[in-house]
Structure formats: C-alpha cells, structure tokens
Image (cartoon, rainbow, N blue to C red):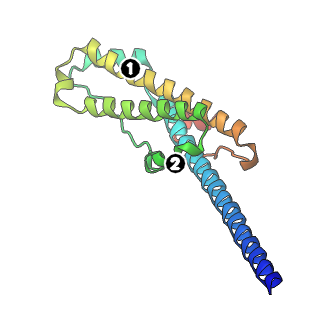
Amino acid sequence: MQDKVIITAVVSISLWVATQVFQLLRDLNRRRIEKNNLVRALYAEIDFNTKDLYIFAENSATLKDLEQKLREDTKLVPHITDAHHTLIYKSNITNLHYISDTIITHLVLYYGLLEKIKEQIDGLNQNSFQTVSANGRYITIKRILDNVKECEGVGDNILSLFTKSYRKLNLTRQHRKLLDSRQRQK
C-alpha cells in the first residue's frame, strides 16, 4: 500500500514538473515570436519612413534656389507634407524590452527626430511664419532639411543594426518605385 502512495506521489510530482517545463517552453516560444514580430514590424516601419525622408530630400529644391525664391516672394510658404508612420513604435513602447539597448537608443533618436520634423513642418503653416524675414524662413526650412538628412542617416543605421543583430530573421529592405523622374533614371 505504501508503495502505491509513493508511486502516485512520484507520478504526480513528475506530471506537475513536466507541465511546468512545458508551460515555460511555450512561454519562451511565445515571447520569441512576439520579439521577432516586433523587430520585423519596426524594421518595415523604419524602412518606409527612411525611404520617404530620402525621397523628400531628393525632391526638394536646392537651398540656393529656395533662398532666391524666398527673397523674391515674401509670402512664399513652401508646401511640405509630413506623413511619417509611427504606429508600430508608439503602440509597442511597452515591448521595447525585446530590443537591445543599443538599438533602443537609436530608435528613440529616430522617432524623436521624426516628431521634431513634424512639428517644424506644422510651424510653416502657422500665420506667424509669414511674418518672419526671408532669411529667417530660409534658416527654418534649412533646419528641416538638416533634420531630414540626420534622421535618414539614423534610420539607415538602425536598419543596419537590425540586420546584423537579428540575422536569423533575414531582414531586407523593400523596393519602392521612386516618385521623381530624376530618381527613376538612376
């Protein structure tokens, strides 16, 4: 009788341990899948935004031409749109612990620059922008273009870091047809 109790206890404990190990392995796999999905989604969002920054910079008038146009037309407000996508980043702030600290630092800089660019562009559409001197308007637009180039560089760096850090995911940039005929010829 005592042997049956011992066998029952050993089997019960073994089943409990096996269940706990199975649950642990299932949770680890779930977290790995979540991490990989987050990395892929951030990579795609950053790739999209970085290409848009490149296209914007390439399609912008030269600074020399812009400066001349601003001096000639005191009412000129350059039309600049801002359509950066930050949904993946913003909706996954609590999951950034899946990403390495080095990449997180770059992500915060990248998305901070995107937000800064958005705010600067919004400022162009304020009535007060037309009261600024031609030189002041030129400097404002030059700052936007400088931030665009910096953000583009940070984006390229992040994409490279993701590719190196998460080799098993085979992350690759997506090809998009460029919007300007000058770029299509390249």
> Where the N terminus falls, by quadrant?
bottom right
Left or right for 78, reference 156: left
Nearest the viewer among 85 and 83 is 85
How far across and how far down the image is residue 59, in percent? 48, 31
The amino acid marked with disc number 1 is Arg
Q: Residue furthest top?
A: 135
Q: Residue furthest front?
A: 2
Res 180 seen here? no
Left or right for 121, reference 75: right
How far across and how far down the image is residue 49, in percent? 50, 40
Q: What residue is drawn where x is 73% and y is 74%? A: 15
Q: What residue is drawn where x is 67% and y is 57%? A: 28
Nearer to us of marks 1 and 2 is: 2
Mark 1 Cα shell of 10 Å, populated few (<14), some (14-19), many (≥20): some
Label 1 SS: helix
**Image-quadrant location for residue 8:** bottom right
* Above or below, 85 relative to 129: below
Nearest the viewer among 17 and 159 is 17
Label 2 SS: helix
Q: Which mark is residue 143?
A: 1
* Above or below, 172 relative to 29: above
Left or right for 111, reference 75: right
How far across and how far down the image is residue 106, in percent? 54, 30
The amino acid marked with disc number 2 is Asn
* First in residue order: circle 1 vs circle 2: 2
Nearest the viewer among 152 and 115 is 115
Q: Residue furthest bottom?
A: 1
Q: What residue is drawn where x is 28% and y is 12%? A: 135
Q: What residue is drawn where x is 57% and y is 41%? A: 47
Q: What residue does disc 2 label?
A: 95
How far across and how far down the image is residue 83, in percent? 40, 43
